[in-house]
Image (cartoon, grey):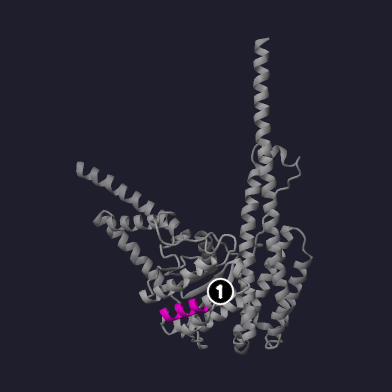
Amino acid sequence: MKKGLIVIIVLVVIVAALAGTVISKYNQLVTLNEEVSVSLSQIDNQLQRRNDLIPNLVETVKGYAAQEKEIFESIAEARSKLIGATGVTEKSEADSELSGALSRLLAISENYPDLKSNQNFIQLADELAGTENRIAVARQDYNTVAADFNKVSKSFPMNLFAKMFGFEPAAYFEAAEGAEDVPAVDFSTQP
Amino acid sequence: MRTIKFRKKHLSAFLFIALILIVSIGIGFSESIPSATSDFYVNDFADILSPETEQSIMSVAVPLAEKTGAQIVVVTIDFLEGQDIESYANKLFREWGIGDAKKNNGVLLLIAYEDRQSRIEVGYGLEGALNDAKTGRIQDDYLVGNFQAGDYNEGVLGTFLKLSEEVYKEYGLDADTLSNQNVYYLPSDEQSGDGKLTLGEILIGIIVVIFMILDILLNRGRITRFVLYTAARSASKGSRGGGGFRGGGGSSGGGGSSRSW
């Protein structure tokens, strides 16, 4: 009789402790989940901002280097891919593709001194570089909170409950493999 | 017998210390951001500014911060230590908390003297007054040309005053005195001498390592220990004494622009 009571008390204490942890971890996850979406929308803002900058920049470069058709095409392609992208992974891939195409666009300015010293081009290039950097910062901030979120949701006891509460692990916004590679220069297509 | 044993023990101790030194230097150099001086608004770690320049900066930056909470901070360093200037600037900006915590109205002018790079980083709250293109233009007009001519004080002061003028205007303050004071307009000429210092940097690195080894072998590492101690002390946060100025807790999302000269 007495033994049974002790067992019940111990069980109640264990369950209560577990429930307490789950509740506090759940609240923590809700907060972190909110932070994850806020940071993701930060990235989206900057991606949008860059998308709006591109037409002006391309037009300016076309005025001096109309024959660089390949680069204009690859930018248009990557841009539309990014607009159509859904989900973090797809977006981050399209983003790094567009970044690569844009850095090639800026690099060709080295071959056109008139373009390079054009005041309008300098301004647009600064805006673009600034936006690229904002994307990089936003991406880093996002990945930090995503890692925090995943850490909590994957450790005990939330690893047992996260699915039940509908928490999916947050995907990381990473530069795709090969995105950091220096683009190859093809001399055969020179006019 | 005894002496040999003693030496062996010594040797392994030396090796151990050397290993720790190398590891700690590796860690320290990869991530460390210096902590702010008590002047806060001007931190001349590269030692390229005259006392007069520093005083001029303080005489503008301090009243501006008192009136508006906006903090314009000048930092000169020697090397970026392998990081790109954008990440370095953003890390420093956030660690120091430049600008008001709510208004995020900080501006950072960072000079990496030996790496020949500069950056103006702008907090969220001032991105309207100082957009990326404008910060690039300011560096072209006031910094790059003067730096190419070796006039570092003029370059820094001109850039700083121009930035202050823009912030004054943003807050509806009278900026005329500042623009009259700013006589450092010097757009860069087109010639861009690319300063490749990599070989020099490698040489300096080798000399430092040799010096450290000699120091450890002949001098029981006294100098190395002293340098490390000072570095560790300056790296540890909050070791600043009372008085002086500090950051308001502002942040930046990476706005601004970079230049090299």
User: x, y (%) of residue A102?
Assistant: 67, 74
Q: Nearer the viewer, residue B69 or A89?
A: B69
**Side (left or right) of A82 relative to B227:** right
Q: Nearer the viewer, residue B48 or B73?
A: B73
Instruction: Give the residue furthest to the top.
Output: A1
Residue drawn at point x = 49 percent, y = 80 percent: B178
Three-letter amino acid code at the position of disc 1:
Val
- Mark 1 is surrounded, within 10 Å at the Cα level, by few (under 14), some (14 to 19) or many (20 or more) other residues, namely many
Residue B133 visible from this viewpoint:
yes
Q: Main secondary structure of the magenta part?
A: helix
User: x, y (%) of residue B83?
Assistant: 51, 65
Residue drawn at point x = 49 percent, y = 76 percent: B160
Which residue is under mark 1?
B167
Q: Chain of mark 1?
A: B
Residue B84 within the magenta-colored segment of the rendering: no
Residue A153 visible from this viewpoint:
no
**Side (left or right) of B2 relative to A131:** left
Residue B154 within the magenta-colored segment of the rendering: yes
Q: Which quarter shows the N terminus of chain A?
A: top right
Q: In the rendered image of this protein, does residue B218 appear above or below residue A65?
A: above
